[in-house]
Amino acid sequence: MSAGTVTEHDDALVAPLGGVISAASSPVPLRLLIGGEWLMGDGAPLASRNPARPDEVVAEGTQAVVADVNRAMRAARAAAREWSRTPIHERGAVLARAAAALEARAGQLGLELAREEGKTLAEGTGEVMRAAQILRYYAAEGDRSAGEHFASPRRGERILVTRKPLGVVGIVTPFNFPIAIPAWKIAPALVYGNAVVWKPASTVPLLAMRLAEALADALAEAGLPAGVLNLIIGPGALGTELVRHPDLDGLSFTGSTGVGRMLAGEAASRGVPFQGEMGGKNAAIVLADADLDLAAEQVLFGAFRSTGQKCTATSRLIVVEEIADAFLAKLAARLDAWRVGNPSDPAVHMGPLVTAAAAAGVRDAVATAEREGARVAYRGQAPEAATHDGGAAPSAFVPATILEIPGEAAGVGDAASSTDSAGAPDTAAAPANIAWREELFGPVLAVRRAASTEEAFALAEDSEFGLTAALFTRDIATALDAVDTLDVGILHVNSESAGADPHVPFGGAKKSGYGPKEQGGAAKEFFTHTTTVYLRG
């Protein structure tokens, strides 16, 4: 099947309230934030381009160099003590002011996000609002429990467990949620009393600068230390310099598995605490008793929103054989109405990938999957180089694609081909197809059929990753069995695999995560350490 709708690239961008913003507007100047001052970097030029219109420069400036990292670390260290002794309610008030600033500019920032990263306008604006929500959640941390009190076996003594900030923490964030992921790291880091040096992905520097502006303005308004938050924009090598810096007391990272493992190794070699959220190859399981219309809607959202560029995206689909054809037909029918094009157009459902190079990598992976035996079950439409930007640049668009991965030689869905001699599911026989094994980070969904619920669960477990999973069933006993069987950090029952609320832990199992979880009260486990106090009068 091949369908879907492609929209034209207009010469103007549609604003959130129906106005028009010219695509030819001047690029926003990029700056670093070091010790409370906005500075030009001393490195190479950097231009952030609209992936839907690569001739359009959204923001430009110069990158940081190693000397800038050193200056930022010195500024953070100088500010750390005063900031840690600032009452937590005052620290929370800074976050609340920054949240209000983001909310006031959500429409503008959402449009900038769509232009810089490629999310749709609705997703971009929603992400800005989610960042504000995260800031507000941690702004109230002073009203929550701050420690523990234990009885002592000795007369006249009490035992208190208090928490202290790590000190100076590094934050390294990816491109795909350029304001929400930084918010859910920086907000707890700050409210618990740490000073921060933040290195965002260099493909999304504008949204990083916007979040830093909101926080820096709030800090200045409160008269608090200028070096509490520092922003370093530059190449990936600066992340290595950050983790190797002798003043670093902790590093929180979200990004690729390879980079995460390298940084974790560097941190471990120096005894520096490390928190890592890395790869995912998340499965959605649709069983025979599922509400197929609901499941089709949610699988579509999980797989293709944000153009599949989410660590929590649904990239594997497991459907029991008896309803597989009917379910895939429903999913295809929904994708037929999926509009792909300029993400600043409110009518568009899916925009481009973050860069043309990322799109080329996804296309190559799909071609490899086909050579390895995958069958294209659905391929939508997307602007190609011939029509994209006058054909002057490679297209960053990739169509929504569904690949069916065959079973073993006996055939798809043949139970004999996927069980061992004892009749149990044989996960070792699962295919080595790239679309099933590797995180492609694009709008590609790999499908396998299962003969039973047991086999479906085994196929879902057939991955080194364990970030999230989605199960579609009406049977509560099956859902409870999934809770015990599926080794993931997040399990959705009858909803898409993506999505996280700020008041509960977020993070993966197996090789998807390293160290304490993020968000909610779990963030305290990374950004603070305990001091046990034996107190006598």
Image (cartoon, helix red, strand yellow):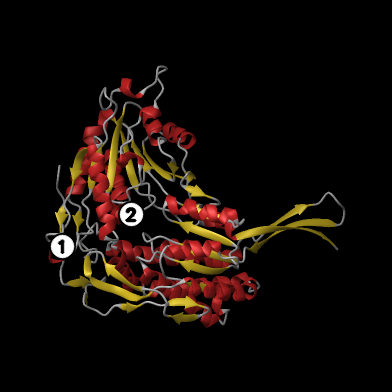
Report how far apart the C-alphas of labels 2 and 1 lie in the structure: 21 Å
Rendering coords of residue 107 (x, y %) = 32, 71
* Type of the residue with mark 2: Gln
Q: Secondary structure at mark 2?
A: loop
Q: Quadrant of residue 346?
A: bottom left
Tag 1: Cα neighbours inside 10 Å, few (<14), some, or many (≥20)? many
Residue at left 21%, top 77%? 24
In this view of the protein, can residue 96 be seen by the observer? Answer: no
* Type of the residue with mark 1: His
Left or right of 491, for residue 436: left
User: Pointer 2: what residue?
Assistant: 309
Seen in the picture, residue 359 relative to 91 is either above or below; the reply is above
Question: Which residue reaches farthest top?
Answer: 421
Label disc, if present, on residue 388 of the rendered structure: 1
Rendering coords of residue 381 (x, y %) = 16, 52
- Looking at the rendered image, the disc whose residue lies closer to the viewer, 2 or 1, is 1
Rendering coords of residue 29 (x, y %) = 35, 79
Residue at left 42%, top 55%? 255
In this view of the protein, can residue 92 be seen by the observer? Answer: yes
Rendering coords of residue 15 (x, y %) = 24, 72
Seen in the picture, residue 24 relative to 273 is either above or below; the reply is below
Indicate the quadrant containing the C terminus: top left, top right, bottom left or bottom right: bottom right
